Image (spheres, rainbow, N blue to C red):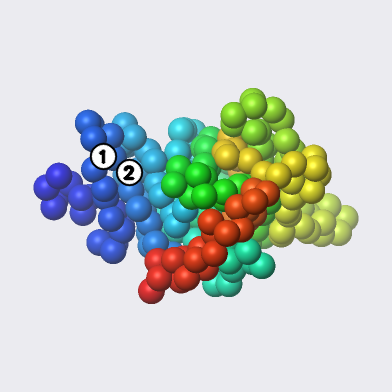
Amino acid sequence: MNMSLRTSLLAIPAATLLLNTGAHAIIVLGNGEVLNLASLMSMNDRRVQINDKIFNFESFTSSTFDTTQMSIIGFVSLNTNQYGLYNVGFDITGPLGDATPGDNVIHEANLQYTVEVEQSWYDRGVRLCDAQMVFNGNSYGGGSYAAVDETIFDLDGNQYLGELEVFHVQNSEAIIQLVDAVDFCDLYGTTGYRAFEVNKNMKFLANGIDGVASCSFIRQEFSQVPAPGALALLGVAGVLGARRRR
């Protein structure tokens, strides 16, 4: 791949585009590295690897938001859990919100993607368990709101697992939930999952000409655990993860 094409795909050159066999490619993002959303969605293969997770961005639909002004940023937690494994995910950033207050039109976007444990780490026993979402949504004026909700499925079993929602709503008083999380392993008494299918819906309404409904940051992260009997295989997971973050 020539340098001009590689540069057009990535917001900063630190991100790496790896070519696999055939015509397929995968973009590797480190913690804090940036990828333009419009460039990503223009690709045939929209897979992004962040640490030991692979995200496949299947679709982004919106009649109001400009993906050229939006970015996907790699996220790896600063600390590991008790198993030496990091939380891994991504941030969506950009001018999300209702830019035409008072017109009673909901500004909306939908992102559908999958997240899976990279095969070599899955073979060593890493499993998905927890999903968490946080955003900096803000609203002003009665009837205004900023909200993000998502539905999560077990990709392999095609089984509905649950929903997450964050919101900032103005009624007679503000109703605010900026963080939501669920542990599916605990909820269903399982030992973890290989992959999730996620459907994320973002909605903003600025009610009245002085209304406000905005957001510039949505973080998605996933925690993980070792499968039973896999602790010995993951004895150096923390060390390897730390090296990747340098």
Q: Which mark is residue 246?
A: none
**Residue type at tag 1:** Asn
For label 2, the crowd category at 10 Å Cα-Cα, with few meaning under 14, some 14 to 19 and many 20 or more, is: some
Name which quarter of the figure residue 158 lies in.
Answer: top right
**Image quadrant occupied by the C terminus:** bottom left
| Residue at image point 58% right, 40% down | 194
Image coords of residue 56 (percent x, y): 45, 38
**x then y, percent, for residue 189:** 80, 42
Q: Which residue is mark 1?
A: 20
> Which residue is farthest top?
158
Residue extending farthest to the left is: 2
Q: Is residue 93 above or below residue 27?
A: below
* Residue type highlighted by circle 2: Ile
In this rendering, the answer to whether 12 lies above or below 163 is below
- Residue 15 showing in the rendered view: yes
Q: How many marks?
A: 2
Q: Quadrant of residue 164?
A: top right
> Measured along the vertical axis of the image, is residue 183 above or below residue 238?
above
Per the image, the residue denoted by label 2 is 26
Q: Earlier in the sequence, mark 1 or mark 2?
A: 1
**Marks 1 and 2, how far apart in space?**
7 Å
